[in-house]
Amino acid sequence: MSALLPVILCGGSGTRLWPLSRRLFPKQFMDFDGSTLFGESLRRVLALPEAGECLVLCNEEQRFLAAAEVQRLGASARILLEPAVRNTAPAVTLAALAAREGGEDPVLLVLPSDHRIDPQSAFVEAVAAARDCAEEGHLVCFGVTPDRPETGYGYIQCGRSAHTGFSIGRFVEKPPLEQAERMLEQGNCFWNSGMFVFKSSRWLEEVERYAPEIAVACGAAWQKRRRSPDFTRVDEAAFLASPSDSIDYAVMEHTQDAVVVPLVAQWNDLGSWEAFYAISPKDAYGNALHGDVVAHEARSCYLHAEHRLVAALGVEDLTVVESADAVLVAHRSRHQDVKALLEHLKNRGRAECDLHRRVHRPWGSYETLALDEGHGRFQVKRIEVRPGAALSLQYHHHRAEHWVVVRGAAKVTVGDREVLLSENESIYIPVGERHRLENTGVIPLVMVEVQSGSYLGEDDIVRLEDTYGRLAP
């Protein structure tokens, strides 16, 4: 039997979960009750009977988030970086090419990074059945029996029995409510889970047959790949020539060897706030409450507070999600339209589409506490640096900085000097002076940084040395 290689796709942006999910910190890396969805996906594949190394695909901007989670869980994983978003078919083609390196031909278990599946035993059984089908040359998708006419999921109408699954009659992408209701009445359909199993060679054969432009572009990008100790990068120019297409549209709707294997489990792709409402415990009035929330005479609402009190009075069927810098208020029936709202915000140039107030970096994070909105002459940040981590050696053309240590110990390079700072000690960094901040202690280093100058943008950073490979080419 061929080896099993789990492939986790974690390059999505989770737009329908705004304002908690942002382009640079999407839902798969968000902390939900002490764990992340990406972390849950890693644990799920680590618990498979033949678990070994897995392959993680993500983009440049999320690579350190993925690497930190892999390290935290003690998983064995290769991380392959996509230069741009090109949907799932090009991503899986890169994964298949990586899997064939060395002449091997493993069975790929392709998983999104944002699902919840319970129990694990049902997942293990479905994977075993799908793997048997894949060994016979089939391309397998997992189907979940629907319990409601959901318009946010794709559907699979199945045909005759085939090996340990069913042949596929057709795929239906996010049908209107009336069509979803009819399919449920017919009883021969599944939700398309977006999880797949096939041999790497079979995928490459079928993508060459049905999506040759994707095959050519990904092949060229893979040929020019570059490796670092932590990541593999494919050629950007070659990859950008690939069409953007999903696994379903590019191959699964055309191949003659597609089958669907039932996944008999509680499954949720957590792709919208309505999905979170569905899995959340409810109060006596049908409200799902998360965080510091008070609901009075409110019914059937999803109320989520992250940083402050959210109070709801006399409302019904609302979704309210509060973050540090934005609040979403929507009717629960409009959960699929959050993506359109986000597009409207993007067109207005709102930074809240991309970034949280707290921004994650490979060395830790920073959070803007105050900004001179009128004139842009000063900014105050809270900086947290992981033990043993260091910022790049850098300088700024337009701003000076004043650092105050509030917790931990720091080693600061300023020009040719090295200074050790403890709690309540500070240092001044003049404009144009090269500098670096390091955490020499065993606890997180917390600093308050006061910036002042004519321009305070993040692009006014000239890196001279960097542990994380972020120097300009």
Image (cartoon, rainbow, N blue to C red):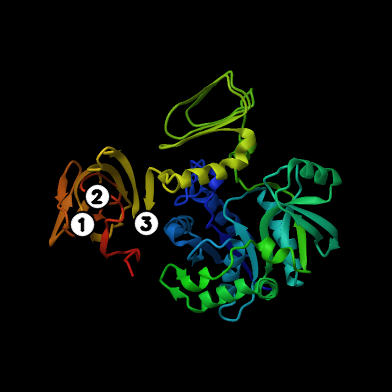
Q: Amino acid at mark 2?
A: Tyr
Is 224 drawn above or below residue 399 in the view shown? below
Q: Earlier in the sequence, mark 1 or mark 3?
A: 3
SS at badge 2: loop
Expressed as whole percent of the image width and height from the top left, the position of residue 225 reads 47, 75
Asked whether the residues under the numbered discs 1 and 2 touch, taking CB atoms below 8 Å apart as contact, a structural biologist would say yes
Instruction: Name the residue beneath numbered marker 1.
Output: 397
For residue 397, which quarter of the picture?
A: bottom left
Alpha carbon distance from label 1 to label 2 = 9 Å
For this view, does 337 lie left or right of residue 436? right
Of tags 3 and 2, the one toward the viewer is 2
Q: Amino acid at mark 1?
A: His
Q: Residues within 10 Å of mark 3 (few under 14, many from 20)?
A: some
Asked whether the residues under the numbered discs 1 and 3 touch, taking CB atoms below 8 Å apart as contact, a structural biologist would say no
Expressed as whole percent of the image width and height from the top left, the position of residue 252 reads 72, 64
Instruction: Name the residue beneath numbered marker 2.
Output: 455
- Disc number for residue 362: 3
Question: Nearest the camera: 81 or 230?
Answer: 81
Q: Residues within 10 Å of mark 1 (few under 14, many from 20)?
A: some
Expressed as whole percent of the image width and height from the top left, the position of residue 295 reads 54, 22
Expressed as whole percent of the image width and height from the top left, the position of residue 179 reads 78, 45
